[in-house]
Image (cartoon, grey):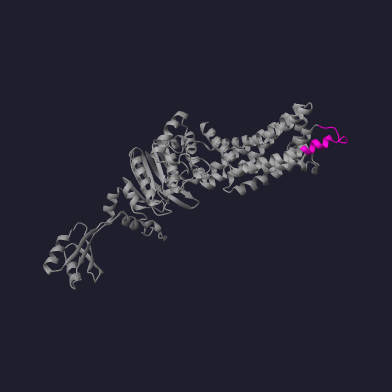
Amino acid sequence: MIDAQGLTRRYGEFAAVDGISFNVDEGEIVGMLGPNGAGKTTTLRMITGFLPPTEGHLTVAGKDLFSDPVAARREVGYLPENVALYPEMRVSEYLRYRAMLEGMSRNEAKQRIPETVESCFLEEVEKQIIGTLSKGYRQRVGLAAAILHHPSVLVLDEPTVGLDPKQIIAIRELIRELGHKQTLLLSSHILPEVELLCDRVIIIDRGRIIAEGSPQELRESWIGNTILRVGLKGGPTDALGVLGALPGVVDVEVLDAETGSYRLECAKDADPRQAVFETAKQRGWVMLELSEERASLEDVFVRLTTQEPSDGSARVAVDDATAAEVPS
Amino acid sequence: MKGLVSVMGRELRAFFFSPLAYIVAALLLLVNGLVFWLIVSYLNDPRAQFGAPLELFFGQTIYFWLVLVFVAPVLTMRLLSEERRSGTIEVLMTAPVTAGQVVVGKYLAALLFYCFLWLPTVAYPLLLAYFEEVDWGPILAGYLGVLGIGAVFLAVGLLASSLTKSQLVAAILTFAMLIPLFTFGLLENLFNDESVRQMLSYLNLWQHMEEFGKGIVDTRRLVYYFSATVLFVFLSARALESRKWR
């Protein structure tokens, strides 16, 4: 549904997006992940036709955004990052305006507006003036306006930013529901969210795609070694050496000597759990904990985006973005 | 077409919902009412020269221009700059409408609201007609002048609004462009060169209104208003589109 080839956007000398190529297939939910300033919004703006690419080729639902912009824009529903609405309008008026702007007939609008209002849970505020709505409701009004004309591609830029946890859950449910019907491209810097919602993740940093795949694939190919956490009562003095000598263990680290907490880094395919258990039994150690640390997508993300850029110009890429801000 | 109409409809609604528009409407009526009353009472004096009140109203007072030069920036400053400041431009420019449709829709809304502002002044000739016979030709010509010059001024304002995110800057810019546009004609007598004088006289808006007030409808004036309006609206559409390439 979306086909981007060598997409580049320059602001003067600076390339905000630098030669990005990707596809989004019909019915797929794709998440675009990256630290702030990575070029997510710029990429989405190009797809929605707000910004023309400096270089590259872009089609949405088979329509070229450069040669046939109006037709291409008709295929796209867009929720911008800072949902901007007209504060003096009522919700129902605004939706009617958007319906007309999308070229719907009066009858079509009459049918779809109530449908959309219902699916976005806006019934209570339908007659309210937008300026008086909370951020969560505004976000939903923006989303309702974006899906009103049944676009074949839905583009959501940071759909849950600035919402409280309850609102986030509601919006996510809505997105998941929509994802079954439409092709969906969303951007986020919140990892659990992307992991939760998306079939495929594109990680971008400094205007380039640095990794792409399903959350599962990314985890597997980028995580590296398995980590075991072992807890031995009292912290036996020889534990460090013994554990380190076990087959498959690459490295041992003492996390807390008093409580006897150890961190074992294991070779990729090795699973020394049984050996750890048997050693403990043999030596009479009291085992309090033996668990595998599951690497999250967050680790992948941090690892990918904190690497020094190849051209040597150091830049801090990860700021607040690494924090999983909300419980998923 | 549907896009144009929906943009225009929303804009008109915004005009009627904003307190600023009512302040402008009240001010315009206050000044015009005062001027009309002054003219009528002046002409009522037996020592005064003979004259038609609305000829003086349209063609002879500075108030007409003062009001117009203030009204145009106030009506147009919001049109495009507010969309850019608040970010709603992103929705507008990703909807299946062209920049031309957006700009023309907004312009027509401003023009319609401008006409609405002048509507109550129709009471003046009606009031006169109640007491004595009125020559309607020059009055219609006067309103044609009001519409034509207003159309140009609003188009200038639209262009200013397309150039900046700030309403204040847009208003000041409009003001700065209107002042020379409206004083060109006054420079006429400063030049000895005949062709320069003729050109300035062609642009002399004061003289235009004087003529309209007398009932003279010169098609050259109408061509001037029409072409200037089209030019400024076209430039606004270009300016809106150029935002993409910066």
Q: Residue at x 45, y 48 (%)?
A: A135
Q: Residue furthest left?
A: A282
Residue nearest the observer in this picture, A35 or B19: B19
Q: Position of residue B154 (x, y in %)?
A: 64, 39
B123 on left or right of B90: right
Image quadrant assignment for residue A269? bottom left
Quadrant in the picture for residue B39: top right
Count of numbered circles in the view: 0
Residue A127 coordinates in the image, percent (x, y): 48, 39
Q: Nearer the viewer, residue A112 or A295?
A: A112
Q: Nearer the viewer, residue A133 or A157?
A: A133
Was residue A245 drawn as part of the magenta stretch in this picture?
no
* B208 lies left or right of A52: right
Q: Residue furthest right?
A: B47
Q: Is residue B40 magenta?
A: yes
x, y (%) of residue B234? 59, 37
The boundaries of the magenta stretch are B37-51
A310 to the left or right of B113? left
**Residue B204 in view here:** no
Residue A27 location in percent, x, y?
A: 33, 39
Residue B10 versus residue A311 in the image, above or below: above
Q: A311 above or below B197?
A: below
Q: Is residue B88 visible?
A: yes
